[in-house]
Image (cartoon, rainbow, N blue to C red):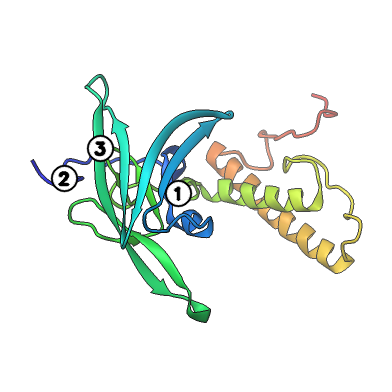
Amino acid sequence: MGGYGSGRKFGAGCTEDYRSIDIRRWQRDGYLVPGRYLDWQWLQNGEKVAAISVKVETGRLRLIYYYRSNDAEWENLDYPVSLQTTACHYGRERYWFTCPAVGCGRRVAVLFLGGKIFACRHCYRLVYKSQRETADDRASRRAETIRRRLGWQAGILNLEGDKPKGMHWRTFERLRAIQDRFAGRCLAGILARLRINGGGKNRFCCTESCTK
């Protein structure tokens, strides 16, 4: 048998779909003290759906949890994950995981449980959801971000709202122009995918008041 991760399964999922551990959060919350034990849980709708135990040692962590693949027997896993540090400003240090998968060893902030062990997203070939967006999906998301900032109703086909109270007119006009640009890109992409042009026999109706 190979070492940890030698039989890992390569996937093509999104990082958001897998359980993960983030060394930045553990450092920020003060958990990285040698000798400390940490019980880490994942919640869904306020209910615990999974958990691991973490033992903090000098220069490394031990991840302890049960794992089962399909209908196989549960396995009690207990393996080390080495830590690395890099210098920050004012003399502080930033901690990183060393990916424990065989042949990897990347310095990463987040590990994912895409198989039997926690490993980096490169080992499991995971992508961010934003990487799977089409150009018009991305334009729509950015337009919606601005609409939320302006307090407008969600949906690029809805009417524009008013200027938020306290916002400078120059800022408002700039954001409105950016929203219009992204909304236009989104609609153009949708029309292109549907192979609809704006004239002739193909009409695109987007208001409830339209009549046939």
Query: Between residues 88 and 153, which one lies in front from this camera angle?
Result: 88
Q: Are marks 1 and 3 in contact (CB under 8 Å)?
A: no
Image x and y of residue 18, in percent: 41, 39
From the image, state whether disc 1 or disc 3 is nearer to you: 3
Report the amino acid beneath label 3. Leu
Furthest-left residue in this view: 1
**Foreground label between 3 and 2:** 3
Pick the residue in front: 26 or 178.
26
Numbered disc 3: secondary structure: strand
Task: Tell me if residue 57 comes above or below residue 11 in the rendering.
Answer: below
Q: Where residue 107 appears, x then y in whole percent?
A: 33, 63
Task: Say which quadrant the N terminus sits in.
Answer: top left
Which numbered disc flags the more N-terminal residue, 1 or 2?
2
> Contact, CB < 8 Å: mark 1 with mark 2?
no
Task: Say what amino acid the circle numbered 1 marks.
Answer: Tyr
Mark 3 and mark 2 lie on one chain; the one further toward the N terminus is 2
Label at residue 6: 2
**What is the secondary structure assignment of the residue under circle 2?**
loop
The structure residue drawn at horizontal position 83% and vertical position 25%, both measured from the top left corner, is 211
Q: Quadrant of residue 40?
A: top left
> What kind of element bears circle 1?
loop
Specify the label residue 128 is tagged with: 1
* Dot 1 crowding, Cα within 10 Å, few <14, some 14–19, many 20+: few
**To which residue does mark 3 refer?**
77
Numbered circles on residues, count: 3
Q: Residue furthest top?
A: 71
Q: Residue at the front extreme? A: 35
Sort mark 3 into few (<14), some (14-19) or many (20+) by Cα contacts within 10 Å: some
